[in-house]
Image: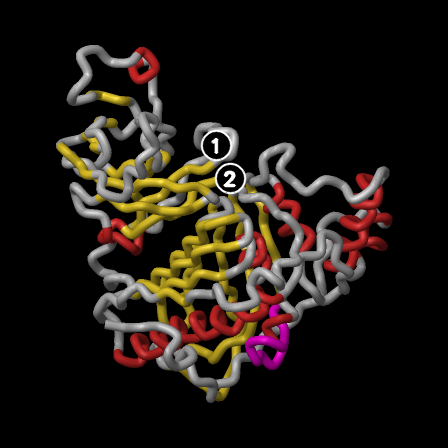
Amino acid sequence: MGVSDRSTRTAQRPGAEVRRNRADLPIPFGWFALARTADLAPGDVRPLFFFDEHLVLFRTEDGQPHVTAAFCPHLGAHLGHGGKVDGNALVCPFHGWRFDGDGACVGVPYARSMPPRATAGACLWSYPVVERNRMVWAWHHPKRVPPLFELDPVPELDDPDWSEPDWYEWEVDTPIQESGENAVDVAHFVTVHGAAEMPEARITLTGHRRDTQLTCPAPAINEDGTIDLTRMEPYELVTRNCGPGMTVQAFEHGARAVMLGAITPITARRMLMRFAFTRPVRVTAQQDLLAGALIGEVVRQVEQDIPIWEHKTYHERPILCDGDGPIAKYRRWFGQFYDEGDAAPPAEAGSRVRNWLETLRSSLAEAPGLCREWFAGLAGARALPARLLVRADRSAQPAAGSRRRK
């Protein structure tokens, strides 16, 4: 299986500014992917715009990637437009000032003595960077706080027994919190994606990690590994989030595939979403076909979600019912990635109590029977199980013309 070309679904269209009536959610902090490793060779310099900031990404001759603020502190030239790498330094295209990967000025070609401000420390802000999972990631925090957690590895992406990844890419006019909420919004699987029934959703929160388990019926797997479309059996799909910018899904029913999702805020209201899919190379023809169908189905569902995301608004306190899934719990988890003081201010005095009451009501709505079990002293209430049935005759291919493939 070859590597697909990166394709971009551009969501900016006439009228986009008019419909931006959603709440002013800030840009969260965390690790975010800026580029694919394969797209940044030694000596490359690339201008970027993420986190509502102009950046420059470059790889020095020692092979290390670096990300700094884009504008030279001398007279303001954009280092990503005409700048070049010389050894392990980034050279400004305007006057030749040289900067290392930490943003320190290491040379001015025509200066008899270095300006004190240029030698006092880093004069270009640099971002913490790691190269992992076939991508270059930068740590963003609005107050320049150092990384608060590590980025999880996805071993399958570097395993020779797994395929080169297929890549898909979309730009969408929505805050990144909305895309993650999609996984716990179980009701939309029926109305948007055509499922016959809703899945049961459970989420487990451990600090910066979030595991989402969706339980749904799937075609039964016979002892010889073949698929029996006449029988259904329960299947659990687990999605793990590492902070707000990275998602991993592992498909292991009948066929195996792993998806890395990298979601990066361009601005507070616009995001870049990249998916990389890999699958085992030594499988039967049927398993390979099923893995391809699973990948196609995920892509199809994303492209069904995008028009909803682009045109919806964000309600800080939505009216939820008992079948909506753990939306309030997800929002509380995601809220930890907003810097203190960044969150939208209360609408009126005394709203803290009202917010608490709304959260309590939402939590009770998400777990029927929780209230009576709580007062009875029982631990661990559970929602009634629901199921998702995917039609066997559904086409697994995404909409025509939505992406380019090599």
Please rate how many residues cluster around mark 1, counting C-alpha atoms within 10 Å: few if below 14, some from 14 to 19, many from 20. few
Looking at the rendered structure, the kind of residue marked 2 is Phe
Q: Quadrant of the C terminus?
A: bottom left
Q: Which residue is mark 2?
A: 29
> What's the residue type where badge 1 is placed?
Leu
Q: Give the prevailing secondary structure in the magenta stretch.
A: loop
Figure quadrant of residue 179: bottom right
In this view, the mark in front (1 or 2): 2
Residue 368 sits above or below residue 45 on the image: below
Residue sitting at 43 percent across and 65 percent down? 10
Left or right side of 29 for 352? right
Where residue 131 appears, as percent x and y from the top left, is 29, 42
Judging from the image, the colouring scheme is secondary structure
Closest to the observer, 180 or 145: 145
Is disc 2 surrounded by few (<14), some (14 to 19) or many (20+) residues within 10 Å? many
Real-space CA distance between mark 1 and mark 2, rounded to the nearest whole angstrom: 10 Å
Q: Residue at x 81, y 53 (%)?
A: 361
- Looking at the image, which residue is at 14% across and 36% down? 61
